[in-house]
Amino acid sequence: MTDVDPPPAASAERVAQLAAALGAVRTRIALAERAAGRGPQSVTLVVVTKNWPSSDVRALAGLGVSDVGENRDQEAAPKAASCAALGLRWHFVGRLQTNKAHSVVQYADVVHSVDRPRLVDALDRAAVARGRRVGALVQVSLDGDLTRGGAVPADAVALADQIAASDGLLLLGVMGVAPLGPGAQPSADLADLAFARLADIGAAVANAHPQARWMSAGMSGDLEAAIAAGATHVRVGSAILGARRDLR
């Protein structure tokens, strides 16, 4: 019998850092819910752990985090495998190539970045082959820059129809990323307008598909604006884990 080394654990100092940052973000969410006249815990926090090690994921799970997001399959797949025993919900939130669909459906419970018919087909086939039903959100481009991902708003309902008609995907709602302002910096005014537009698109999708009421919007710098517009899920990375580092 061969002994297997336990996975590395985060240091006590790192756990304390994560706990403090996580607490601060949870407070921001609670205050934003209250300001928007919404009930407590109406918003799900998805902690985006891109470029941070599995030891941080395990520490976050110990602090009560249940939803984890990743942007790149080559990092997400081994990380999800190493943390499989934690019972986390894995959200794929980055741009996705069709040739990665078979890998992503092995661990992702929800794909937030579904933005074109070919990707719907690829994810559907892969999920059916794995005997899974994977949640899917229509990513909507809120700035017209399709290099950042997202379907044009006029195509959102048709794409939602395609997801809803598939066998391997479960339509959950819409996702969007706020536009960047001058100097590629976040802009509060642009975020307010963009998230209001996403809410309108989400309402049109939900009108056709009543179960699809997720609105995934808001990150570290603009989660309050997203919650004010009706976000049900916020995707927060750097405000909890710190400035991203490159694991490559």
Image: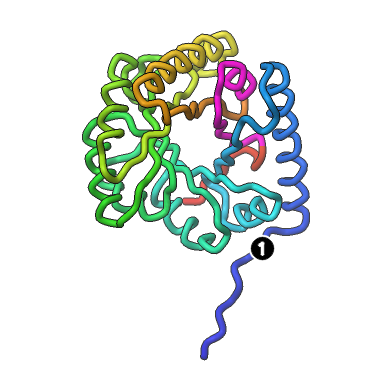
Asked if the magenta segment contains residue 230, the reply would be yes
Where residue 35 appears, as percent x and y from the top left, is 71, 17
State the image quarter where residue 242 is shown.
Answer: top right
Where residue 98 appears, as percent x and y from the top left, is 26, 42
Asked if the magenta segment contains residue 68, the reply would be no
Please tell me which residue lies in front, 202 or 188: 202
The span shown in magenta is: 222-239
Q: In this view, does 16 lie to the left or right of 141?
A: right
The residue sitting at 71% across, 46% down in the picture is 18
Q: Tag 1: Cα neighbours inside 10 Å, few (<14), some, or many (≥20)?
A: some
Q: Is residue 153 left or right of residue 162?
A: right
Q: Is residue 248 left or right of residue 11?
A: left
Please tell me which residue lies in front, 8 or 62: 62
Looking at the rendered structure, the secondary structure element under dot 1 is loop
Q: What residue type is labelled 1?
A: Ala
Which residue is identified by label 1?
9
Q: In this view, does 40 lie above or below 53?
A: above
The residue sitting at 55% across, 41% down in the picture is 48
Where residue 41 appears, as percent x and y from the top left, is 67, 33
The residue sitting at 32% across, 29% down in the picture is 115
The residue sitting at 36% across, 39% down in the picture is 170
Please tell me which residue lies in front, 17 or 231: 231
